[in-house]
Amino acid sequence: MRHRLSAFFYRIASWQTLLVSLVLYALFPGYILKNIETQLNLYARKAIGPLDLLIFNGNPSVIEQMIAQYGAEGRAYYAQAELTADLAYPIVYTFLLCIVLSLVFRQTSASPSSLINLLPLVVWAIDMLENACVVVLLNTYPHLSPLVVTMCLVCTNLKWIAFFTIIATILYGLVRLAIRRLTKSRRQQEIKPV
């Protein structure tokens, strides 16, 4: 199954697919998620933002305070946003990252390293767990389970670690591609008869 999914992304990866993915992706942070955050800030009566943007925060009391500050209407709105827009967004960015990795690490053979284009599925899975924790916390306030709060923090931090790992992998792949092209270009210039 993994090899077929990986092969699917390698097969459809093109500049056109990348462009469509980028447009879909831009719609979320540029409009949809931005509006959700604005609405959350209105409910909280201050700039607070969503829980899943807490990068490398290990303090459960911060999550508890944020959930309290959203207010009842804010919590209901946020839970609905988590079950709609924040279910679609991970699918969109996962697809985009799979396409980017497929373009950067295009393989001709089906080696184990060819599965590198499926790394974004790890972020997607963690993001889904994080979203589930957020919805549970929003719906059970004020009786927050310490276990769910901790799971939410762990998932958020793991998601960002996995995301930054993928970005580093893409950068590594781009540097590798640039070096290969420069080396190939130099070899071709050396071979040309004068």
Image: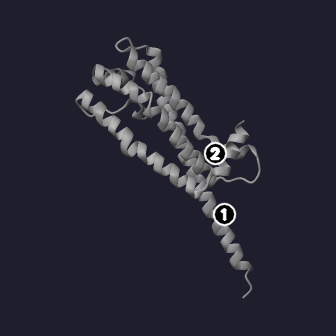
The correct choice, above or below, for 194 with respect to 122 in the image is below
Percent x, y for residue 31?
36, 43
Residue 14 lies left or right of residue 29; in this view the side is right
Percent x, y for residue 13?
62, 52
Q: Which amino acid, by three-letter code, is at mark 1?
A: Arg
Residue under pointer 1: 180
Image point 43% across, 34% down: which residue? 85
Rendered image: mark on residue 117? 2
Q: Nearer the viewer, residue 67 or 184?
A: 67
The correct choice, above or below, for 74 with respect to 185 in the image is above
Give the farthest residue toward the bottom: 194
Residue 120 lies left or right of residue 60; in this view the side is right
Residue 82 position by quadrant: top left
The correct choice, above or below, for 11 with respect to 138 in the image is below
Q: Earlier in the sequence, mark 2 or mark 1?
A: 2
Residue 113 lies left or right of residue 120; in this view the side is right
The correct choice, above or below, for 106 with respect to 194 in the image is above
